[in-house]
Image (tube, helix red, strand yellow):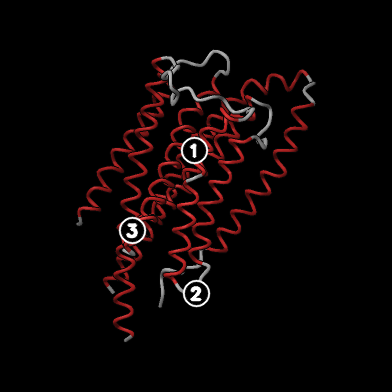
Amino acid sequence: MTGVRRGAIGLTLLGLAGLIGLFWMSFFWVSTEANQGVVQRIFYVHVPAAWTSFLAIGVAALCSAVYLWLRDDKLDRAAMCAAEGGLVFATIVLTTGPLWGKIAWGTYWTWEPRLTLTLLLWFIFVGYFMVRNATEDPDKGKRFAAVVAIVGALDIPFIHLSVIWFRSLHPQPVVAKPEGPTLPADMLATLMVGLGTFTILFFGLFLFRYALEGLRSEVDLRARRSAA
Amino acid sequence: MTLRHDSRLPFLLAAITVLLAFVLTAGDASALVAQESGLPGTRVAEQNLRPYWHVFAAYTIVITLIGGWAFSIARRLRNLEERLVD
């Protein structure tokens, strides 16, 4: 078993244990928010999923930028694996958010800046794979996808600052702000467990996905050799 | 034989279509329902449990998507390992 797989198994198991802990904290430990009630508990999976999708596009963009420079296929594979994870977590953001919004705002969706920019991020993840698979020449597809990932990462500061720059329905930041977090201690602890858990799960599954791509390239290589 | 181009394009296009349909229709329709806030008395009680269903659905989505990704990776890994052995 390779080091990558061992790391993947360790991180994924740790992440799954964290997920069980997060669910227990969310349902049985953390206090109920006074104004929003029970639906506020969606916050403990929605925000970590958003953070993880930002992390994923960041990793994809970084690996893509270095890939364009060094043309090392391992970096392209890493970028693709991060983008796949980003698509999963961005989908969680875009489905859990509206479930909260329906109770808090009375509507599943509204075209306000943060929601629209997050939907754009989801399309960037989808576009990454479409561009990658749309060319006859695989190397060209990899280069085009790398550019999509780099441009996509520019969406992240806009998503974060959109609620400050524009008149927005979406709640203002309660943790990542200059004067520090304004959440009660138990809510902050639950959120931090969520952020840690989702990050560990992302990297665990990312490593599994990376091992898969390594194996795929080995199978491709053997197939080419046997065909020659 | 190429494994990289495994044609996920139809799946991605289908996902985009479904999401667009949801966003464009559900958003407007639910906004209309929200404006008509005068619910009959029998439905007020039903509304009290609604936040619980939404929380339940949100956490189910989290398990389903993360679990689905993990199972998808495991399935693809197993297939490739079998091919490598062959």
Amino acid type, label 1: Pro
Could you tell me which residue is drawn at 60 percent across and 37 percent down?
A115
Q: Earlier in the sequence, mark 3 or mark 1?
A: 3
Q: Secondary structure at mark 1?
A: helix
Task: Report the Cα–Cα distance between label 3 and label 2.
Answer: 21 Å
The image shows residue A73 at horizontal and vertical percentages of 33, 64
Task: Please tell me if label 3 and label 2 are on a single chain.
Answer: yes
Read off the residue under disc 3.
A75
Depth check, front residue: A189 or A182: A182
State the residue lying farthest toward the top: A34
The answer to whether residue B50 is left or right of residue A172 is right
Name the mark on residue A214: none
Depth check, front residue: A217 or A16: A217
State whether residue B18 is above or below residue B43: below
Task: Please tell me if label 3 and label 1 are on a single chain.
Answer: yes
Q: Secondary structure at mark 2?
A: loop
Amino acid type, label 3: Leu
The image shows residue A113 at horizontal and vertical percentages of 62, 36
Could you tell me which residue is drawn at 75 percent across and 20 percent down?
B42
Read off the residue under disc 1.
A157
Could you tell me which residue is drawn at 77 percent across and 23 percent down?
B37
Could you tell me which residue is drawn at 54 percent across and 24 percent down?
A172
Q: Earlier in the sequence, mark 2 or mark 1?
A: 2
Name the mark on residue A136: 2
